[in-house]
Image (cartoon, rainbow, N blue to C red):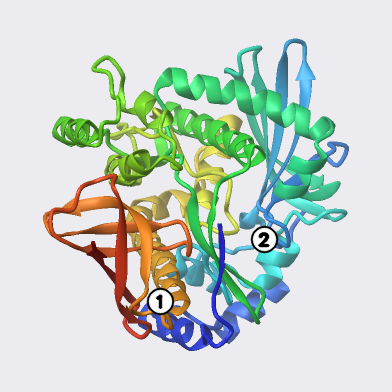
Amino acid sequence: MRTSVPAVADIDAPLAALRAELRLPSVFPDDVLAEAAAATWDPAGRVDARDLALVTLDPAGSRDLDQAFVIERRGAGHRLSYAIADVAAFVAPGGAVDAEAHRRGETIYLPDGRVPLHPPVLSEGAASLLPGADRPAVLWQLDLDDSGELTATDVRRAIVRSRAQLDYVSLQQQQGEIFALLQEVGERRLVLERERGGVSLPVPEQQVDGDGTSWTLTYRATLPVEDWNAQLSLVTGMAAARLMLDQGVGLLRTMPPPAADVVASLRRSASALNVSWPAATSYSEFVRTLDASVPAQAAMLRLASVLFRGAGYVAFDGAPPAQQTHSAVAAPYAHATAPLRRLADRYVSECCLAACAGVEVPEWARTALPALPRAMAEADQRAHAADRAVIDIAESLVLQLRVGEVFRGVVVEADGSRGEIQLAEPAVRARLRGDGLVLGTVVNARLTVCDVARREVEFTVVG
C-alpha cells in the first residue's frame, strides 16, 4: 500500500529538526576527509580471486556495496563464495577515519540522505564492491551439503572484481541462473532455520521513500529474493560465531530467549484474539503461521514483537560468554557482512581471518573489542530512534490536513482505554483512545490529534 505525502508538506524542516535532536553529524571533519581521500590498499599477500563471477544484490541505486557472492553447485550441495568489503585495508587503526567510525557506530538512513559510517569516498567508492573494479575483500568460502548445512569454512584476504550490480526487484522479475541458485540455497537454509527454531516476524515494513522532491509512505513486504539473500548473510554470521568461539576471542550478536511469563502472556492474548496457538506449538512455529492481512493476526504480530527484544553485542577473550546464542537465529551468530555500514563487522572479520590462519588476532582489533558492545548499543539506539521518528514525521504530514475525518483500522494494541490502531490506507500506525478497546477488532476512529512539530498522531474510536 503506497500513500503519497501531500505536495504541500515540507518534510525537509522536520528532518532537519530530527538531525539536530539526535545530534547526527552533517559532515565529516576535514582531517577525516583528507585521510580517507589519501587511503590506498596493498595487494600483497592477497589471493587473486578475480576469476570468481561475483555479483552484488542490494536495493536499486545502492552505492555502499558490502557483499558480493557467487554460488556454484558441488555435487548435491553448493559452494558459496562470499566477498565482504575489506574496510580495514583502508582504515588505519587509531587514525582519524577510525576514530570517527567509532563515534558514529553505523550508517543511519533518512529519506533525504544517509548519515554514513565512513566518508563516501570510501563507502561509495574505493572500498565499495562496485562492478568492474578490483577491490580488496575478505573472502569467505562456505561449503554446504545437500540439505544446506555448513560443512567447511575458509576465510582469507583476496582481490575480487564484481561482475554486475543486481537489485532485488529486477532479479525477482527476470530470474535466471543466479536466481535459481540463490533460491536453492535460500530455501534449504530456511528449512534448517525452521528446524532449529529460528524465526523472524513476517510484518510488512512501514517505510518512507523519497526522490528529493516527493515522498511516499508505504507498507512493504520483503521479496523472496531478499529472504534468500538474507540467508547468505546469516550462514556467514553463524560460521563467524563458530570460528570465534573455537578461537576464544571475538564479538557476538546475541539475544536472550523470551521469558516464560512473556510467552504465557502472548498465549493469553492469542486466546483473546481467537487465534489458534496449539499447546505443543513453539512460539517460533506459531509466529510463522500468522498472516498480517488478517486483522486479528496483524494484532498478534504486533504483540509478538516483544519476543525480539534485548539484542546486543558481547565481546569475549578467553572464556566464552554465558549468553552465546541469538534466539531469533537459534544459534551463535555474529554481524560479519556489512563493514561499510556497521563498525562491529570490521572487527569480526579480523577475528575470523586470524582464526582461519591460525594466528593471533591483531592487537589493535583485540584491544578494541571490550568497548564495542557499548559503542554499538548507542549507535543502534540512535538508528532505531531515527527510523521511528521518520515514520512519525511522514504519518503526521500525510494526515495534517485530515483532522476530524473518520478512518477504518485494526486495533493492534489495547490496554484499557489506550491502544494502537493500524490503518491500511493511509499506511499509518498510531495511538488510539476509546472505551473497552478489544485487540484485533476493526473499528472506525476519528483523527483527533495531528502535530507535525511534535510528531504526534492520535485517533479516537467513534460509534
- 54 relative position to 288: left or right: right
- 282 relative position to 134: left or right: left
Q: Which residue is mark 2?
A: 64
Residue 59 image label? none
Q: How many marks?
A: 2
The quarter of the displayed image where residue 282 is located? top left
Figure check: 137 above or below 261:
below
In depth, the one of 138 and 331 nearer the eye is 331
The residue located at (66%, 25%) in the rendering is 185
Whole-percent x, y for residue 39 in the image: 70, 69
Whole-percent x, y for residue 377 in the image: 34, 57
Quadrant including the N terminus:
bottom right
Quadrant including the C terminus:
bottom left
Q: Which residue is mark 1?
A: 396
Confirm whether residue 153 shows in the render.
no
Check disc 2 and report its element: helix, strand or loop.
loop
Q: Nearer the viewer, mark 2 or mark 1?
A: 1
Confirm whether residue 189 shows in the render.
yes
- 279 relative position to 37: left or right: left
The residue located at (41%, 81%) in the rendering is 400
Q: Residue furthest front?
A: 463
